[in-house]
Image (spheres, helix red, strand yellow):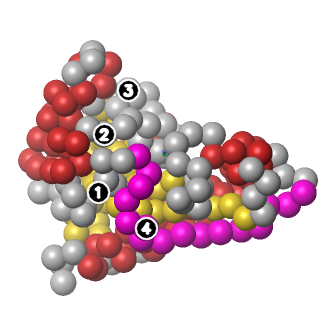
Protein backbone atom coordinates (compact mmCIF):
# COMPACT_ATOMS: atom_id res chain seq x y z
CA UNK A 1 0.00 0.00 0.00
CA UNK A 2 1.46 3.38 -0.97
CA UNK A 3 1.93 6.09 1.63
CA UNK A 4 -0.79 8.72 1.73
CA UNK A 5 0.31 12.20 0.78
CA UNK A 6 -0.42 14.49 3.72
CA UNK A 7 -0.54 18.28 4.07
CA UNK A 8 -0.42 19.85 7.52
CA UNK A 9 -2.11 23.21 8.12
CA UNK A 10 -0.70 25.32 10.94
CA UNK A 11 -1.00 28.82 12.40
CA UNK A 12 1.79 28.89 14.99
CA UNK A 13 4.53 27.09 16.85
CA UNK A 14 3.95 23.70 15.20
CA UNK A 15 4.93 21.31 17.99
CA UNK A 16 2.34 18.80 16.74
CA UNK A 17 3.73 19.23 13.24
CA UNK A 18 7.16 18.40 14.69
CA UNK A 19 5.80 15.27 16.37
CA UNK A 20 4.23 14.17 13.09
CA UNK A 21 7.49 14.81 11.23
CA UNK A 22 9.49 12.90 13.86
CA UNK A 23 7.19 9.88 13.93
CA UNK A 24 7.80 6.96 11.68
CA UNK A 25 5.98 7.84 8.46
CA UNK A 26 5.19 4.38 7.19
CA UNK A 27 1.51 4.92 6.37
CA UNK A 28 1.72 8.58 5.40
CA UNK A 29 4.23 11.05 4.07
CA UNK A 30 4.13 14.75 4.95
CA UNK A 31 4.77 16.53 1.67
CA UNK A 32 3.41 20.01 2.34
CA UNK A 33 2.91 22.45 5.22
CA UNK A 34 0.76 25.56 4.84
CA UNK A 35 0.43 28.35 7.40
CA UNK A 36 -2.18 31.09 7.32
CA UNK A 37 0.18 33.19 9.48
CA UNK A 38 3.29 34.50 7.68
CA UNK A 39 5.86 34.13 10.47
CA UNK A 40 4.58 30.92 12.10
CA UNK A 41 7.48 29.06 13.75
CA UNK A 42 6.18 25.78 12.34
CA UNK A 43 7.18 26.87 8.81
CA UNK A 44 10.84 26.73 9.81
CA UNK A 45 10.38 23.27 11.33
CA UNK A 46 8.97 22.06 7.99
CA UNK A 47 11.81 23.57 5.98
CA UNK A 48 14.39 22.02 8.30
CA UNK A 49 12.78 18.66 7.65
CA UNK A 50 12.98 19.29 3.90
CA UNK A 51 9.22 19.65 3.47
CA UNK A 52 7.66 22.27 1.18
CA UNK A 53 6.32 25.10 3.36
CA UNK A 54 4.00 27.84 2.11
CA UNK A 55 2.22 30.82 3.61
CA UNK A 56 -1.31 31.64 2.55
CA UNK A 57 -2.13 34.78 4.51
CA UNK A 58 -5.88 34.83 5.20
CA UNK A 59 -5.70 38.58 5.90
CA UNK A 60 -5.10 39.24 2.20
CA UNK A 61 -8.59 37.90 1.49
CA UNK A 62 -10.46 40.24 3.84
CA UNK A 63 -13.84 38.78 4.76
CA UNK A 64 -13.94 36.40 1.77
CA UNK A 65 -13.26 33.11 3.60
CA UNK A 66 -14.20 31.01 0.62
CA UNK A 67 -11.71 32.78 -1.67
CA UNK A 68 -8.96 31.95 0.84
CA UNK A 69 -10.12 28.36 0.96
CA UNK A 70 -10.34 28.05 -2.84
CA UNK A 71 -6.66 29.00 -3.07
CA UNK A 72 -5.87 26.64 -0.20
CA UNK A 73 -7.74 23.86 -1.97
CA UNK A 74 -5.89 24.58 -5.24
CA UNK A 75 -2.51 24.33 -3.50
CA UNK A 76 -3.50 20.96 -2.06
CA UNK A 77 -4.95 19.55 -5.28
CA UNK A 78 -1.90 20.69 -7.28
CA UNK A 79 0.32 18.54 -5.04
CA UNK A 80 -1.96 15.50 -5.10
CA UNK A 81 -2.66 15.73 -1.38
CA UNK A 82 -4.81 12.87 -0.05
CA UNK A 83 -5.20 13.84 3.64
CA UNK A 84 -5.25 17.28 5.28
CA UNK A 85 -4.28 17.42 8.97
CA UNK A 86 -4.97 20.55 11.02
CA UNK A 87 -2.32 21.05 13.70
CA UNK A 88 -2.99 24.25 15.62
CA UNK A 89 -4.69 25.77 12.56
CA UNK A 90 -6.74 28.56 14.10
CA UNK A 91 -9.30 29.22 11.35
CA UNK A 92 -12.81 27.85 11.25
CA UNK A 93 -13.29 26.28 7.81
CA UNK A 94 -16.41 26.90 5.72
CA UNK A 95 -18.74 24.18 4.38
CA UNK A 96 -17.05 24.58 0.97
CA UNK A 97 -13.70 23.29 2.24
CA UNK A 98 -15.10 20.81 4.75
CA UNK A 99 -17.26 19.16 2.06
CA UNK A 100 -14.41 19.08 -0.45
CA UNK A 101 -12.21 17.15 2.01
CA UNK A 102 -14.88 15.16 3.88
CA UNK A 103 -13.42 11.99 5.44
CA UNK A 104 -9.88 13.15 4.67
CA UNK A 105 -9.73 16.24 6.90
CA UNK A 106 -8.60 15.68 10.48
CA UNK A 107 -7.99 17.90 13.51
CA UNK A 108 -6.44 17.67 16.97
CA UNK A 109 -8.28 19.37 19.80
CA UNK A 110 -7.04 19.90 23.38
CA UNK A 111 -9.95 18.35 25.29
CA UNK A 112 -11.80 15.08 25.65
CA UNK A 113 -14.54 15.82 23.11
CA UNK A 114 -17.49 16.12 23.25
CA UNK A 115 -16.42 18.01 26.38
CA UNK A 116 -15.13 21.54 25.82
CA UNK A 117 -15.27 22.23 22.07
CA UNK A 118 -13.94 25.66 21.05
CA UNK A 119 -11.32 27.66 22.93
CA UNK A 120 -9.93 27.91 26.50
CA UNK A 121 -10.35 24.18 27.03
CA UNK A 122 -7.95 23.92 30.00
CA UNK A 123 -9.63 26.75 31.91
CA UNK A 124 -13.02 25.21 31.22
CA UNK A 125 -11.97 21.71 32.32
CA UNK A 126 -10.82 23.18 35.66
CA UNK A 127 -13.92 25.37 36.06
CA UNK A 128 -16.17 22.36 35.39
CA UNK A 129 -14.43 20.38 38.15
CA UNK A 130 -13.42 17.64 35.70
CA UNK A 131 -11.25 14.89 37.13
CA UNK A 132 -9.75 13.97 33.78
CA UNK A 133 -8.70 15.86 30.70
CA UNK A 134 -6.89 15.15 27.47
CA UNK A 135 -6.87 15.46 23.70
CA UNK A 136 -8.93 14.22 20.77
CA UNK A 137 -8.18 13.57 17.12
CA UNK A 138 -11.33 13.75 15.02
CA UNK A 139 -12.62 14.14 11.49
CA UNK A 140 -13.66 17.69 10.65
CA UNK A 141 -17.34 18.34 9.91
CA UNK A 142 -19.24 21.59 9.50
CA UNK A 143 -20.04 21.86 13.20
CA UNK A 144 -16.91 22.91 15.11
CA UNK A 145 -15.09 20.06 16.94
CA UNK A 146 -18.00 17.67 16.37
CA UNK A 147 -16.78 15.08 13.83
CA UNK A 148 -16.19 11.36 14.27
CA UNK A 149 -13.55 10.65 16.89
CA UNK A 150 -10.50 8.76 15.65
CA UNK A 151 -8.68 8.59 18.98
CA UNK A 152 -8.29 10.14 22.43
CA UNK A 153 -5.64 10.29 25.13
CA UNK A 154 -6.54 11.15 28.71
CA UNK A 155 -4.86 11.94 32.01
CA UNK A 156 -6.02 12.77 35.55
CA UNK A 157 -6.40 16.39 36.64
CA UNK A 158 -4.38 16.98 39.82
CA UNK A 159 -5.49 19.30 42.66
CA UNK A 160 -2.45 21.49 41.97
CA UNK A 161 -3.17 21.89 38.23
CA UNK A 162 -3.51 25.28 36.55
CA UNK A 163 -4.45 26.00 32.92
CA UNK A 164 -0.72 26.23 32.19
CA UNK A 165 0.24 22.86 33.71
CA UNK A 166 -2.72 21.21 31.97
CA UNK A 167 -1.71 22.76 28.64
CA UNK A 168 1.79 21.40 29.03
CA UNK A 169 0.72 17.84 29.91
CA UNK A 170 -2.05 17.71 27.29
CA UNK A 171 0.45 18.79 24.63
CA UNK A 172 2.69 15.84 25.54
CA UNK A 173 -0.30 13.54 25.06
CA UNK A 174 -1.08 15.18 21.71
CA UNK A 175 2.41 14.49 20.42
CA UNK A 176 1.95 10.76 20.93
CA UNK A 177 -1.73 10.67 19.90
CA UNK A 178 -1.64 12.53 16.59
CA UNK A 179 0.92 10.41 14.69
CA UNK A 180 -0.90 7.24 15.80
CA UNK A 181 -4.32 8.53 14.68
CA UNK A 182 -3.05 9.94 11.41
CA UNK A 183 -1.44 6.60 10.56
CA UNK A 184 -4.72 4.87 11.46
CA UNK A 185 -6.69 7.13 9.09
CA UNK A 186 -4.09 6.76 6.32
CA UNK A 187 -4.39 2.96 6.49
CA UNK A 188 -8.19 3.12 6.44
CA UNK A 189 -8.90 5.34 3.46
CA UNK A 190 -8.41 4.10 -0.09
C1 LIG B 1 -2.49 22.31 20.30
O1 LIG B 1 -2.69 22.20 21.68
C2 LIG B 1 -3.77 21.95 19.56
O2 LIG B 1 -4.50 20.93 20.15
C3 LIG B 1 -4.51 23.25 19.61
O3 LIG B 1 -3.54 24.25 19.42
C4 LIG B 1 -2.28 23.78 19.90
C5 LIG B 1 -1.27 23.92 18.78
O4 LIG B 1 0.02 23.68 19.24
N1 LIG B 1 -5.53 23.30 18.62
C6 LIG B 1 -6.69 23.89 18.80
O5 LIG B 1 -7.00 24.47 19.82
C7 LIG B 1 -7.63 23.82 17.61
N2 LIG B 1 -8.91 24.36 17.92
P1 LIG B 1 1.20 23.45 18.22
O6 LIG B 1 1.20 24.60 17.22
O7 LIG B 1 2.45 23.48 19.06
O8 LIG B 1 0.98 22.12 17.55
Labels 3 and 1: the sequence-earlier one = 3
Labels 3 and 2: the sequence-earlier one = 3
Mark 2–mark 1 distance (CA, rounded to whole Å): 11 Å
Residues in magenta, as a range: 144-159
Viewed as shown, does residue 101 lie left or right of 173? left
Helix, strand or loop at mark 3: loop
- The residue most toward the bottom is 1
Mark 4–mark 2 distance (CA, rounded to whole Å): 18 Å
Mark 1–mark 4 distance (CA, rounded to whole Å): 12 Å
The x, y position of residue 131, in whole percent, is 78, 63
Q: Which residue is mark 2?
A: 93
Tag 2: Cα neighbours inside 10 Å, few (<14), some, or many (≥20)?
A: some
Q: Which residue is mark 4?
A: 149
Find out if the beta carbon at label 2 lies less than 8 Å from the nearest ligand 1 atom. Answer: no
Give the numbered dot on residue 105: 1
Labels 2 and 1: the sequence-earlier one = 2
Residue closer to the observer: 33 or 46: 33
Amino acid sequence: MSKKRVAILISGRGSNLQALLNAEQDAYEIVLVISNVPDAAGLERAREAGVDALTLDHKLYGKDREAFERDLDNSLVLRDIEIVALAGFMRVLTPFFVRAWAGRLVNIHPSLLPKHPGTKTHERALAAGDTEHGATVHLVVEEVDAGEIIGQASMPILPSDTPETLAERVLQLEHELYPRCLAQLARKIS
